[in-house]
Amino acid sequence: MTVKELSEKLGLRVLAGEGGLNRQVTGGYTGDLLSWVMARLPENAVWLTVMGNINAVAVASLKDAACIILTDSALLDTEALEKARQLDFAVLTSDRNSYDLGVKIAELLG
């Protein structure tokens, strides 16, 4: 499943990185402690977090994640938005919490 398909099925809003919407999603990861996520975030995973700063974009890009989904209506700051656009890295948002989205993503990915 692609990031775009996942976005459509979950009603997510794209904040940046439209060019990254065709990335394949193979799993997910939830976490808000950057050093912890950096050591564990799988390649091609959706990262569910409330961390909307430039460091989150850097970690996700470095780990070759499929995208970031900001949960609980968390905000993406201006610097992070600019970096995500430069990298064409998909960042999406939802008002749902990480648990609820994680369950839905697991169901969709089987």
Image (cartoon, rainbow, N blue to C red):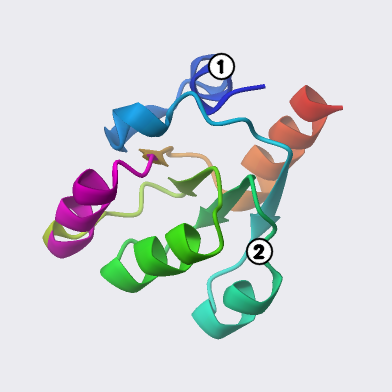
- Examine the structure image and report whether residue 8 is included in the region drawn in magenta: no
Quarter-of-image position of residue 20: top left
- Badge 1 element: helix
- Tell me the quadrant of the picture where the N terminus can be found: top right
Amino acid type at mark 1: Glu
Q: Badge 1, how many Cα within 10 Å: few under 14, some, many 20+?
A: some
Q: Residue at x 34, y 28 (%)?
A: 19
The percent position of residue 13, horizontal first and vertical second, equals: 35, 28
Q: Is residue 99 depicted above or below 6 in this figure?
A: below
Residue in the picture at 53% in, 31% down: 23
Give the answer, above or below, for where 78 lies relative to 1: below
Vertical position of residue 16 compared to residue 31: above or below: above
For disc 1, the marked residue is: 5
What amino acid is found at the position of numbered circle 2 in the picture?
Leu
Residue 83 disc label? none
User: Label 2: how many residues lie within 10 Å, few (<14), some (14-19) or many (20+)?
Assistant: many
Q: CA distance from mark 1 to mark 2?
A: 21 Å
Mark 2: which secondary structure?
Answer: loop
Instruction: Give the magenta part as a residue range.
Output: 79-90
The rendered magenta stretch, by its main secondary structure, is classed as helix
Whole-percent x and y of residue 16? Answer: 27, 38
Circle nearer the N terminus (1, 2): 1
Outermost bottom residue: 35
Q: Which mark is residue 41?
A: 2
